[in-house]
Amino acid sequence: MTIPMQSTPGSSGYLELYPERKVPFFKNPYILGLAAVAGIGGLLFGYDTGVISGALLYIKQDFEDVRNSSFLQETIVSMAIAGAIVGAAGGGWINDVLGRKKATLIADVIFTIGAILMAASPNSYVLILGRLIIGLGVGIASVTAPVYIAESSPSEIRGSLVSTNVLMITGGQFISYLVNICFTQVPGTWRWMLGVSAVPAVVQFILMLFLPESPRWLFIKNRKNEAIDVISKIYDLSRLEDEIDFLTAESEQERQRMNNIRMLDVFKSKEIFLAFLVGGGLLAFQQFSGINTVMYYSPTIVQMAGFQANELALLLSLIVAGMNAAGTVLGIYLIDHAGRKKLALSSLGGVIVSLIILSVSFYKKASSSSSSSSDFYGWIAILGLALYIGFFAPGMGPVPWTVNSEIYPEEYRGILGGMSATVCWVSNLIVSESFLSIADGIGVGPTFLILAGIAVVAFLFVLLYVPETKGLTFDEVEVIWKERAWGKNPNTVSLLERASQS
């Protein structure tokens, strides 16, 4: 059975017919509550990936082997990413089998164990093990939170709500720098920095016990009464019946298809593979354009720019992290107004310019003979760092995660969400494990120039391959991939063209 796109609840055609049925972003506290609690996983994701940048300055003081080895420093940073690769790969399966809620609870338990182990580490090797464990939690959370929020959100505000998870990630990074500064004069410095992440994990675990499962997952599992109870709190009566009828019909089809789903099917189905290439490609370019190099190593980059004091390096990095969070707030507004594609292109344009400024400033600083000009180029490098974050945060921060939460069919969403997140973390691992070594080998300036070149390729990728999904239902997005794979359906083309132009 094919459901006409214009009659699909939440579609652009449906909302044009019934504009009074639109769900405003701030008018439903229940949806905001779901997004906020699920977003604590994003906060933990951001905190645990960001806190190591400041903690590393003090870990080097306590552990001589770390102080004397760039490889060990990179391993401490990147081991959490290695764990995230495994967590993301398994997280898709956990989401499909156990549900989004249980996946979140499992991630919280893993976060807590990892935080305690890191805080109590007697040597660098136990610390690396703790980072690996906490990475497992980060990987599961990176798959689960965007999907849970997207499946609980009305299509007209889905982008903004999923972007709140990215805000929590950047907010977690900001908090990590703030915590780093607060504990600089406390005995045990880095142990407190790393161990405090157990607190939000416990808070989310408790709150999540009182929240429902994703309504779409409940429909798929034939738990219709529970699903209706959830969506009745999201939509008013005028739209509720349409949503129930639509999800009931769709879930029956999806249940039948899910019985035959295998991971290899991703590579056999042309339209599904195209969706994966775009989703995985976006997340790969998000990493290879340098964002987590900047976030993980920003205190180190600040010191490379000539500001040697640990406290000053952390303070300047806190400002960078604050800009990242503030830029994400702007992105939450723009993503459902300007659209995903325009926002990503604008973001990447600014990122390219910023990376070139960083490259030139470090090159000039390295070749400068006087201390005054060296200081000048050091401040230009800090400016380039701030501009980079200012352009990246509103666009390439939220857009890849938002697009990945909405471009996959329900029956593939867990598998492909896990695969795409795995691509993200593998890319992240490559960048974080190699940045310091490459910078030592060829210089910081050329390293940033390489990142600028990658950002140019990313710009072309978005321009040529990423569709606009603003305001589209999950089913309308499916039609895009079918059209790209097999040609346009004359019954749907006008709707999709209108959506892409809006």
Image: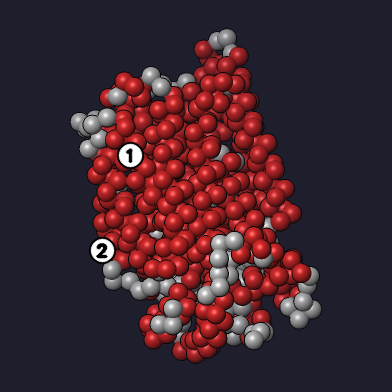
Question: Circle 1 sits on which residue?
Answer: 129
Q: At 61% from the left edge and 70% from the top edge, which residue is drawn?
A: 471
- Kind of element beneath mark 1: helix
Question: Circle 2 sits on which residue?
Answer: 206
At label 1, which amino acid type do we have?
Answer: Leu
Residue 91 at x, y percent in the picture: 43, 58
The residue most toward the left is 187
At label 2, which amino acid type do we have?
Answer: Ile
Q: Is residue 146 above or below residue 235?
A: above
Q: At 55% from the left edge and 10% from the top edge, which residue is drawn?
A: 370
Q: Determine whether, in the image, residue 359 is placed left or right of residue 248.
A: right
**Which one is closest to the eye, mark 2 or mark 1?**
1
Residue 139 at x, y percent in the picture: 43, 52
Query: Is the C terminus in the top left, top right, bottom left or bottom right quadrant?
Result: bottom right
CB-based contact (under 8 Å), mark 2 and mark 1: no
Q: At 32% from the left edge and 62% from the top edge, which residue is drawn?
A: 105
Which quadrant of the structure image shows residue 246? Answer: bottom right
